[in-house]
Structure formats: structure tokens, C-alpha cells
Amino acid sequence: MDRKRLRLLFNEAMARARAAERQGDFALAFAELERAHILGQRWLIRHLRSHWGMLRIARKTGDRREAMGQVTRLIGSPFFWLVGWLPKGNPGGANISPVKPVPLKGDLAIELAGYSVWRDVAMRFAIAAVALGGLWLLGR
């Protein structure tokens, strides 16, 4: 799994979502945002960008249920991202539980083969431990 390739695929999905949104094809825009969510959920900012886009589409289409689901996900995502509660393959829409893993299909199954959220969580906690240790040493 190549990080640069995933970043490229994420950016491409976001660009297609924006283009579809500008053309008024909100269903296609939302589908591209779901793809972007799956590709970008391992990075907090990309994860939040995909949810923000879904919220924007929900507001434009008047879908209150989706909008509330996206607000909830935007609020909860930083915590869940930190602790690794990011189920692989979950497209991020309010029609699916935010904690339900979804089997990957097509090219996404290939692109994300071997990805383990727990490896990322271990790295986040290691970074946090080093940062806290540094702060503790500075405060002595």
C-alpha cells in the first residue's frame, strides 16, 4: 500500500466529487465522497474533508438525516481516529453505522490490501508518548 498513491486517489475522488457537485449531480458527488472517505480515513484531515463534503451535499439536497449524521461524524471523528475506531471500508454516510466495517470491493480492495488501522494507532500513541515525555522533561 503506497501512501502517495492513496493520497493521489483521494485527491482524484475529491476533485470528481466537486465537479459532480458543480454540475448538480449530487448522487455522483456523494458516491465520490464515500470513495474519498474510504481512501482517506487513515488521515484525520482527509477524513474530516470527506465528511465535510458529505455534509455540504446533505445540506444542498435537504437531507436532514444525512446532515445530522455528518455533524455527528465530524464531532466524533477526531477521537475515533485517535483510538483507531475506523472500520475499514466504511463509506462514511449516515445510512451505515459509523463503526461497521464494510468489505472492500474492486480497486479499493487492491489499493487497501494489507492496511491495518492498528499499525497507525500504535504510531499515533508512540508519537503522543514522545511528545508528552518531551513536555515532561521541559517542565522539570
Image (cartoon, helix red, strand yellow):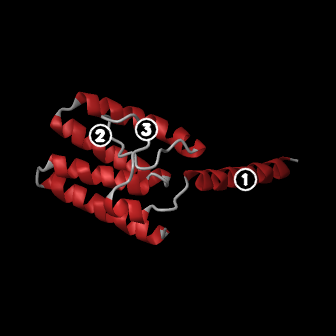
State whether residue 70 is above or below residue 88.
Answer: above
**Distance between the alpha carbons at the discs numbered 2 and 1:** 33 Å
Badge 3 amino acid? Lys
Contact? badges 1 and 3 (CB < 8 Å): no
**Disc nearest the viewer among 1 and 3:** 3
- 41 vs 79, left or right, is left
Badge 2 amino acid? Leu
- 66 vs 79, left or right, is left
Badge 1 amino acid? Ala
The crowding category of the residue bearing disc 3, from other C-alpha atoms within 10 Å (few below 14, some 14 to 19, many at least 20), is some
Disc with the residue nearer the chain's start (2 vs 3): 2
In the image, residue 95 lies at what x, y percent?
Answer: 30, 34
Q: Which mark is residue 123?
A: none
Residue wearing tag 1 = 131
**Distance between the alpha carbons at the discs numbered 1 and 3:** 32 Å
Residue wearing tag 3 = 100
**Distance between the alpha carbons at the discs numbered 2 and 3:** 20 Å
Number of numbered discs visible in the structure rendering: 3
83 and 19: which is toward the camera: 83
Seen at 55% across and 52% down, the residue is 117
Seen at 45% across and 71% down, the residue is 4
In the image, residue 38 lies at what x, y percent?
Answer: 39, 52
Seen at 52% across and 62% down, the residue is 114
Q: Which mark is residue 55?
A: 2
Seen at 55% across and 55% down, the residue is 116
The crowding category of the residue bearing disc 2, from other C-alpha atoms within 10 Å (few below 14, some 14 to 19, many at least 20), is many
Label 3 secondary element: loop
Disc with the residue nearer the chain's start (2 vs 1): 2
Residue sitting at the far right: 140
Contact? badges 2 and 1 (CB < 8 Å): no
Disc with the residue nearer the chain's start (1 vs 3): 3
